[in-house]
């Protein structure tokens, strides 16, 4: 069993704060500060360039990839970290398209995160005018998987509502129609159990600064099924994905397996912070995390619905169809969220009217949820959100 009292004690959370925004930016692991400082002083400072070998910097992207892989059901040696999620989306979709050169359509849904759609739109523009990004409603995805589709690109858990796609069923349906799949796990990794191998997924991508707690700017990750890893041609063919980077060949030859999805020099400072977060994840079991997350979201929904009739649940009521977040609709949601933040309950707001709360068992417990619900009841019941200062929009919402 995962001991959540132990994991909670490993995070540095400010006094008086109930942090329900770990689905957007996870909090600081206590060990990260010393770990990064050691890396700076002892490794970068003392080893200088020899750190790439002596301190194992060059192996960090795949080492961290394997640790993340355990949480998402990936076989060892199939995940590598680096770059940002937007870039990994581009990389995965480009490689997936090349595996189906006879087809020109990428299918996605309008619940996807805009950056994923923007990146594919940009990619398809450079491939030529006969390529098409087809965006349908989430409920229409299954019926839209037709034999002209090359790639199905979906985010498993909707970032606004927490609604989940059925990864296994949709992947099966895609394969039956000759479609290559790209799954975005931004709101899945560390939030819900994922079984990439068992679902027979082709490509997957995700970020490490949300539920995985790697810190702002932490690297993304990409998974390529071992069935495809030596066939998938990397579109971002940087030198560190080359078979022999230090041969300095003028011709690109992809490295073996997942190594070819590396691009350039890895961000070692960020990866060091992420490794402190992964030490905590190494102690956790995703089945325990999921069970506890469902308890916490069910408790929050029942408390809020009992006390705040103005709020409308925007997440699926069935916990099995919901990720690890709960969203409510409220016309004055932005102001209400500012009022909550002023009282130490940190969630976030997604336009036009969604108040979003992430539930992360590694450091949120029942008492936190009860206190957050009490504060919400006070703010809604007494209209404490209804002041001009809470209605001024900031740059990041
Ligand atoms: C958070 C998120 C992103 C963000 O991409 P970055 O390149 O890391 O800024 C992209 N896609 C999805 C689905 C997300 O949830």
Image (cartoon, rainbow, N blue to C red):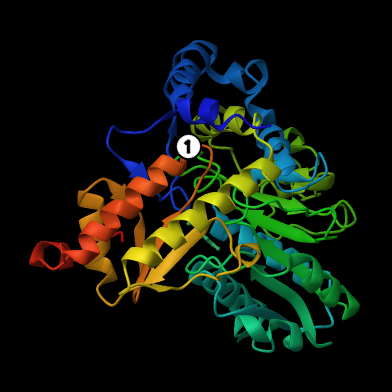
In this view, the residue farthest toward the left is 388
Residue at 42 percent across and 23 percent down: it is 33
225 shown above or below 286 = below
208 shown above or below 59 = below
Q: Quadrant of the C terminus?
A: bottom left
Between 296 and 348, the one nearer to me in the picture: 296
Give how far across and how far down residue 229 sits, in percent. Answer: 84, 53
* Quadrant of the image occupied by residue 175: bottom right
Residue at 79 percent across and 59 percent down: it is 233
Give how far across and how far down residue 311 sits, in percent. Answer: 34, 72
Give how far across and how far down residue 11 sits, in percent. Answer: 44, 30
The mark total stands at 1
| Left or right, residue 3 beside residue 196 | left
225 shown above or below 307 = above
Residue at 62 percent across and 80 percent down: it is 138
Between 57 and 270, the one nearer to me in the picture: 270
In this view, the residue farthest toward the front is 306
Residue 72 visible, this angle: yes
Q: Is mark 1 within 8 Å of ligand 1?
A: no
Q: Quadrant of the N terminus?
A: top right
Residue tagged by mark 1? Answer: 363
| Left or right, residue 141 beside residue 211 | right
Q: Secondary structure at mark 1?
A: loop
| Mark 1 Cα shell of 10 Å, populated few (<14), some (14-19), many (≥20) | many
Residue 242 visible, this angle: no
Give how far across and how far down residue 90 sits, in percent. Answer: 62, 64
Between 260 and 199, the one nearer to me in the picture: 199
């Amino acid at each position: 069993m995962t001991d959540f009292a132990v994991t909670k004690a490993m995070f540095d959370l400010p006094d008086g704060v109930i942090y329900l925004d770990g689905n957007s930016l996870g909090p600081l692991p206590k060990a990260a500060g010393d770990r990064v400082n050691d890396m700076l002083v002892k490794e970068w400072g003392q080893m200088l360039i020899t750190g790439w070998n002596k301190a194992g910097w060059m192996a960090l992207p795949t080492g961290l990839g394997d640790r993340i892989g355990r949480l998402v059901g990936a076989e060892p040696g199939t995940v590598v970290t680096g770059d940002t999620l937007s870039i990994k989306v581009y990389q995965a979709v480009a490689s997936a398209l090349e595996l189906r050169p006879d087809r020109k359509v990428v299918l996605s849904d309008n619940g996807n995160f805009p950056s994923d759609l923007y990146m594919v739109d940009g990619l398809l523009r450079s491939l030529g005018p006969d390529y098409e990004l087809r965006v349908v409603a989430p409920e229409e995805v299954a019926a839209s998987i037709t034999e002209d589709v090359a790639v199905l690109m979906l985010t498993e858990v909707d970032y606004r509502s927490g609604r989940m796609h059925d990864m296994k069923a949709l992947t099966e349906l895609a394969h039956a129609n000759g479609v290559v799949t790209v799954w975005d796990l931004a709101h899945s990794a560390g939030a819900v159990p994922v079984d990439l191998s068992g679902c027979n997924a082709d490509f997957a991508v995700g970020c490490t600064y949300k539920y995985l707690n790697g810190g702002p700017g932490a690297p993304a990750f990409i998974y390529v099924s071992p069935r495809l890893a030596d066939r998938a041609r990397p579109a971002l063919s940087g030198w560190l994905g080359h078979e022999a980077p230090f041969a300095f060949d003028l011709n690109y030859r992809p490295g073996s397996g997942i190594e070819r999805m590396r691009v350039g020099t890895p961000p070692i400072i960020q990866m060091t912070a992420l490794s402190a977060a992964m030490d905590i994840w190494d102690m956790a079991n995703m089945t325990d995390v999921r069970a506890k997350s469902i308890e916490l979201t069910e408790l929050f929904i029942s408390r809020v619905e009992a006390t705040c009739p103005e709020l409308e649940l925007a997440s699926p009521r069935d916990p099995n169809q919901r990720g690890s977040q709960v969203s409510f609709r409220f016309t004055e949601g932005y102001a209400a969220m500012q009022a909550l933040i002023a009282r130490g309950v940190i969630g976030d707001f997604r336009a036009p009217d969604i108040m979003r709360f992430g539930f992360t068992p590694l450091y949120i417990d029942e008492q936190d949820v009860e206190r957050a619900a009490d504060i919400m009841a006070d703010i809604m019941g007494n209209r404490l959100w209804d002041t001009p200062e809470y209605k001024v929009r900031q740059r990041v919402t």
